[in-house]
Amino acid sequence: MGKSKTMNCRVCGTEIAKSAKSCPQCGAKNKKPIYKKWYFWLLVLIIAMIAISSSGGDSADTEPVEYVVTDIKTMADELENNALNAEDTYSDAYLEITGVLNSVDSDGSYITVTHYQDAYGFDSIQCFVKDDTQLDVIKTKSVGDTVTVKGQISNIGELLGYTMDIHEIF
């Protein structure tokens, strides 16, 4: 069985040849549906390519983040000496900080990291946990362990110090 060479007219329903230019009964033109024309599919392809390049290009176009290595003691001293300068220096900065794990929130929403010489944790950075991968790393650590945190400073305050959104912890 092959494909039928006839079809019904869209207007009057009379059986006509698929290749007929018009219906012999009513005179209606016999056009191919738009989705069967080559230029329709070319247009769909062009639109799809534009959509993919404009929406999917976000991750390819973003430049890799470069983290500035610094230490908590320097950051704390700058905040104490001049909070306005510390704000200018560290606001939204991408930093890599190595220090001592000072506390772990029981809900796992944040940790605090302090510098090596601060046994009481007065000069610490509160670091907010973003995902389960980070939680898994934190679960392997204990207070007093050395940790390195990469992230972006999200807030700076004279009383509460620095807060950071963790991107990576190890």
Image: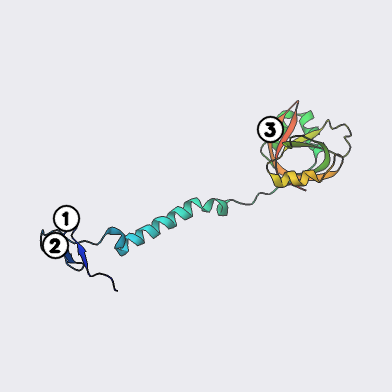
**Residue in the image at 72% along x and 32% along y:** 85
Q: Which residue is mark 3?
A: 155
Point out residue 10 in the picture as x, y percentages from the top left corner: 19, 57
What is the distance, in whole Å, between disc 1 and disc 3 at their CAs?
69 Å
Q: Which residue is mark 2?
A: 23
**Residue in the image at 80% along x and 41% along y:** 71
The local secondary structure at tag 3 comes to strand
Q: Which residue is mark 1?
A: 11
Q: Is residue 86 above or below residue 19?
A: above
What is the distance, in whole Å, between disc 2 and disc 3 at their CAs?
74 Å
Left or right of 48 on screen, residue 84: right
Point out residue 144 in the picture as x, y percentages from the top left corner: 87, 40
**Residue in the image at 51% along x and 53% along y:** 56
Amino acid type of the residue that numbered disc 2 sits on in the rendered structure: Cys
Residue 125 vs residue 13, the one in the foreground = 13
Which sits earlier in the primary sequence, circle 2 or circle 1? 1
